[in-house]
Amino acid sequence: MTQPLLELHNLNKSYGTFEAVKDIDLSVDAGEFLAIMGPSGCGKTTTLRMMAGLEDPTRGDIRLEGQQINDLPVWQRETPLVWQNLALFPYMTVRENVEFGLRMKKVPAPERQRRCAEWLERLGIAGFADRNVAKLSGGQRQRVALARSLVLQPKVLLLDEPLSALDAHMSIRMQGELKRLQRELGITFVYVTHSHSEAFSLADRVVIMNAGRIEQLGTPQDIFLRPRSRFVAQFVGGISLFSGVLKTTKEGKIGIDSADGLLQIADPASAQSGSRCDLAVRADRINVTTQPGWGTNEVPCTLMSEEFAGAVVNLHLETAAGTGIVAQLQQRDLERLSARAGQQVYASWHPEDGVLLGAPALKAVA
Ligand SMILES: Nc1ncnc2c1ncn2[C@@H]1O[C@H](COP(=O)(O)OP(=O)(O)OP(=O)(O)O)[C@@H](O)[C@H]1O
């Protein structure tokens, strides 16, 4: 088995009595693009700053290539951090900013200039080399910040919401460039973001944090299709949740007995009958009809509102028991449905589209 490049073992950070990061265990492989997501204040930045050496862990280990680096000062680490406000030196030119780290490392002038020129070229900012960074656009400044870190040939590049200051168009463009660079260079990226679309489209694996802990770690597909907890399902969004008790009927059907009736599932894993469970169903798996009789799990609902999201529309429904359901329809399907807010409709889905959460057997899966 190959050794992970970066490892966090039982990493903790407290500020006074407040525990910002709790018992984080995480391994990042060489060349991997790992995204860290979670609600504001869940400890993403603190975790990243500990990796960068900008915060001391209260407890636990950080290892790079197997070596503990907890006490290594920032400037000796090979894990630079690029963050949202970039922290470029405002009175320096682009070239001076990019060369700065190499000067600190006492890299001889000819090599410094060669490496700086290579990165200015690579990131398409050679034309502004002698311009003051204060006179650049947001996207250009972002490139300077990346060049300044990449010129140091880091083992891991840590990025804290690097695109959050850019407008939507520039952010999408930079996402593509970041992914291309990461693939071409084979550098390991650890990337903190608030943006679901950035995490899910860029990362090989995504960490979802909640209140200082890792709630789920998996590929974007895993997290999107198989959220492990209510928290992850709600955080990812576009998922309807039903609570109930796992039950096998006299006819041999398996489902959860919920306030909205028996909701059948295809795969109960090894959850035991009688255990309390939550069932998650993705919005794009829910059919909506104006007449009953179309599906296995069919729940009468009231259409509460429609939310237009480009080519698709999210329908917000509510059952008689007060459960909120969200269904995602193509625009043309909505036209065919021709239902209005306040009208009774029927939500249905196939048993195999329901994912059980909270069952003991599922929790035990690593
Ligand atoms: N220096 C500090 N002193 C005291 N508390 C701190 C300090 N730094 C961070 N915290 C607290 O630790 C918790 C985690 O902060 P952190 O910045 O890691 O969260 P985050 O997930 O990155 O949030 P955001 O998405 O808002 O940036 C927060 O409650 C924050 O207020």
Image (tube, grey):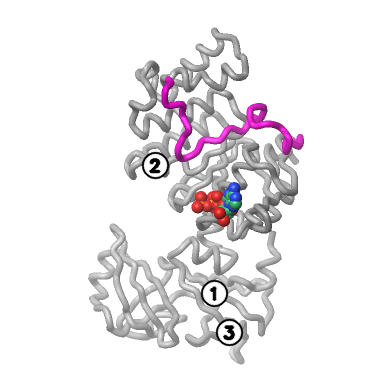
Q: Amino acid at mark 2?
A: Ala
Is residue 305 depicted above or below 226 in this figure?
A: below
Residue pointed to by mark 1: 279
Mark 3 and mark 1: span between their CA atoms? Answer: 16 Å
Q: Name the residue beneath numbered marker 3.
A: 253
Q: Mark 2 or 3, which is nearer the eye?
A: 2
Choose the circle earlier in sequence order: 1 or 2.
2
**From this viewpoint, which residue is outermost toward the front?**
16
The 10 Å Cα crowd at callout 3, few under 14, some 14 to 19, many 20 or more, is some
* Residue interval drawn in magenta: 66-92
Taking depth in this image into account, of 11 and 359 the one nearest to the observer is 11
In the picture of the structure, the residue carrying the numbered disc 2 is 165
Number of callouts: 3
- For marks 3 and 1, give the one nearer the viewer: 1
Q: Quadrant of the N terminus?
A: top right
Give the residue at x 62% y 19%.
105
Residue depth check, mark 1 versus mark 2: number of the one nearer the observer? 2
| Disc 2: residue Cβ within 8 A of ligand 1's nearest atom | no
Q: Say which element carries label 1.
A: strand
Q: Please check the rendered image and state whether residue 87 is part of the magenta-colored stretch, yes or no.
A: yes
- Give the main secondary structure of the magenta stretch: loop
70 sits to left or right of 106: right
